[in-house]
Image: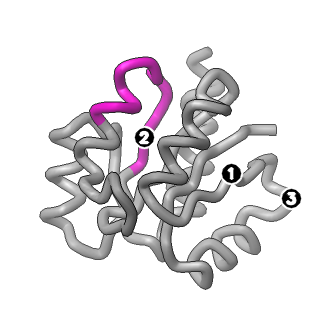
Amino acid sequence: MHKVLFVEDEKQVQGLWRAQLANKGVEMIQALNGTDAAMHFLVFSKELAAIVLDGNIPGVKTDTRELIHDFRQSFQGPIIAVSSDENLRALMVEAGADSGCEKKDLAKHLLAVLERSHASA
């Protein structure tokens, strides 16, 4: 089972991903904003297989590039930037995310990333 932190403020999107990833070996840890993301990261960072990070999130830590920088201080696993805005995804990759995709493509992209990550471990 791969434990993955999902930082996404839209509950409908979280629910869609949960349905798409059901029975695929992914345990979702959900954060609806940057503050929750930072808190969950502190608790689960050593257990995480990956982080999925929406480009626009509410909360105290709303700059996703800052969150990526904070995560990268101790997390070497894959970080996936998720946004419909291609330029924002590119900025997040520049900030340290490993890859990016649109929300509709996340489940397939995440499973491929986890498979590659697991194969190289």
Residue type of the residue flagged with mark 2 = Ile
Q: Of the residues under marks 3 and 1, which one precedes in the sequence? A: 3
Q: Which numbered dot is residue 50? A: none
Residue at label 2?
A: 79
Could you say which quadrant of the image residue 87 lies in?
bottom left
**63 over 2 or under it: above or below:** below
Question: Looking at the picture, how far across and down is residue 81, in whole percent?
Answer: 36, 53
Alpha-carbon distance for marks 3 and 1? 15 Å
At 56% across and 28% down in the image, what residue appears? Answer: 117
**Residue 45 colored in magenta in the image:** no
Question: Looking at the picture, how far across and down is residue 89, in whole percent?
Answer: 24, 58
What span is in magenta? 69-80
Residue type of the residue flagged with mark 1 = Ile
Residue type of the residue flagged with mark 3 = Asn
Residue at label 3?
A: 23
At 32% across and 39% down in the image, what residue appears? Answer: 68
| Left or right side of 67 for 33 | right
| Left or right side of 119 for 22 | right
